[in-house]
Image (spheres, rainbow, N blue to C red):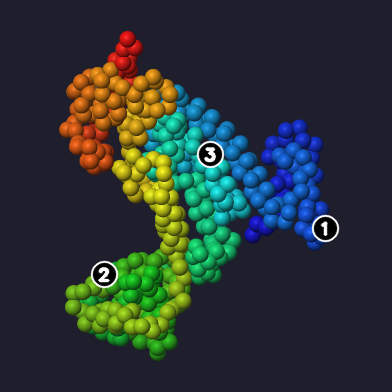
Amino acid sequence: MFSIEDCIIQLATPVSSPGSRSSALSTTNCEEKKGEGGRVHFMNPYVNKTSVYKGSKILRAARSQRVKAQSTRATQLYHNLLKIAGKSWGVPLIHRRTLYKTVTERVLAHGAVAWCLEPTVRIARKLSTIQRPFLLAISGAYRTTSTAALQVILGIPPLHLQLQREARGTALFRLRLPLSTNVSDIDPSEIEEKATGWSTHPSEHLSPTQISLDDGGNINTGLRIYTDGSKTERGAEILALLKAVEHAVSLPTQQLTILVDNQASINSAANPKSHNSIARKIFKLLHGHPHIRVSWIKAHVGYIGNEEADRLAKETAETENFPKTPLELPKSFIKTFLRQKMLATWQMAWDDGDTGRLIHNIIPKVSLHPINWTRNEVLFFTGHGPLPSFLHRFNLAETSFCSCGGIGTPIHYATVCLLTTSYHMAPPSQQHQPIWFRRVANNSTSRRKIHNLLHFLQREASLFRPDPN
Ligand SMILES: [Zn+2]
């Protein structure tokens, strides 16, 4: 695990060397002084002067150094992105987004577990500053557009939440450390480990007669064992198959068939290269006991054995003291959990935020998928576009009036302005404006109109400027 010492070592390593001789901090130095009052003296090219830090402050300082280094890297990446995207935004939005997700975010996430497991407000703010230029470059929105709105439009979560999610994943899967109890009580030892090492030799395989996907409902000789796993418990089906095979092995050798109504467990048990440790166990047992046969059986078509197994599984799952088998949690389950945790935090911030409310009205629910708006649509719906109402608000125009006499708001141009009649849509009543925006945003024909309207506004900008006289 990353400890204070690790951070200090990182801190002591100058990211770039702006003429620094050397940073005078050494770990031994810290160790010695920690005992006496917890004060450490160190010098760092980024602190500029010898500073005194108390115990935990070291960690905080190390973290902020880390964020600073990430920030430098991000600036370089940003300029590279601009080079690729070009001034005319030749690269489509969706590819710019992919570039960000696959390159920039990966670089920024480096070592997140050491510094972003519990990001402080300061770190969150700093990361937001790092992310913002990318959001602007990807969407092509005006510089005044709120970060929160851009995140929701592009389906890119706030950077500190994304990094925290990855840090949590690393902590659980790689470092096998539990998360703080208010996040989750998942015990890392309960997480399924991918079965590694050599799988079975290719010459060792199960014959199609021993494990078959043909309906075994008509098998009526020998001993038949039916299995069923509760549908509510993950991985129960394959565990049921393992229990059945283990039981069959303990019986005296005889003609014996295990009937399973779940194709997925048969497939993984028959696959000698499966990464599932339970499937590997089943394969080994079956290979060592060729008299045990496994066959698929069609469910819910009246095979008495299968129906009975199904009934028993349901009955057991409903009882209060249903014996909990120590099932390993699949990795995918934890990943989904972490993603949902992140989305919930993001959603809460989006609902409680005070910026980007126009967009909140249109897109109330956050998602990891981008809303496929063109740049013009973004300009219209955020209200931050080539519109007198916006320009006046930010002191870029003398008046918020359109040359036709009305106030130059987005809705003015889309519904009533005399100069844009060919782009008009039915105007809403005053109290129905939020609904109108939602309806327009969800209708592709209306959005097309908006796109063309904005194009027209940009091309004929001078037409909408009121005559100064
Ligand atoms: Zn007008």
Q: Foreground residue, 107 or 222? A: 107
Q: Foreground residue, 191 or 366? A: 366
Asked if disc 2 is less than 8 Å from ligand 1, the answer is no
Residue type marked 2: Asp
Residue in view at x 31 percent, y 75 percent:
260
Choose mark 2 or mark 1, whichever is in front.
1
Give the label on residue 129, or none.
Answer: 3
Quadrant housing residue 279: bottom left
Label 1–label 3 contact, CB within 8 A: no
Q: What kind of element bears circle 3? A: helix
Give the label on residue 32, or none.
Answer: 1
Q: Earlier in the sequence, mark 1 or mark 3?
A: 1
Q: Is residue 181 above or below residue 433?
A: below
Residue in view at x 43 percent, y 60 percent:
337
Could you tell me how far apart the alpha carbons at marks 2 and 3 are, in whole angstroms?
59 Å
Give the residue number, with chain letter if any, for mark 2.
214
In the displayed orientation, state which residue is furthest to the bottom: 252
> Do we see residue 290 in this rendering?
no
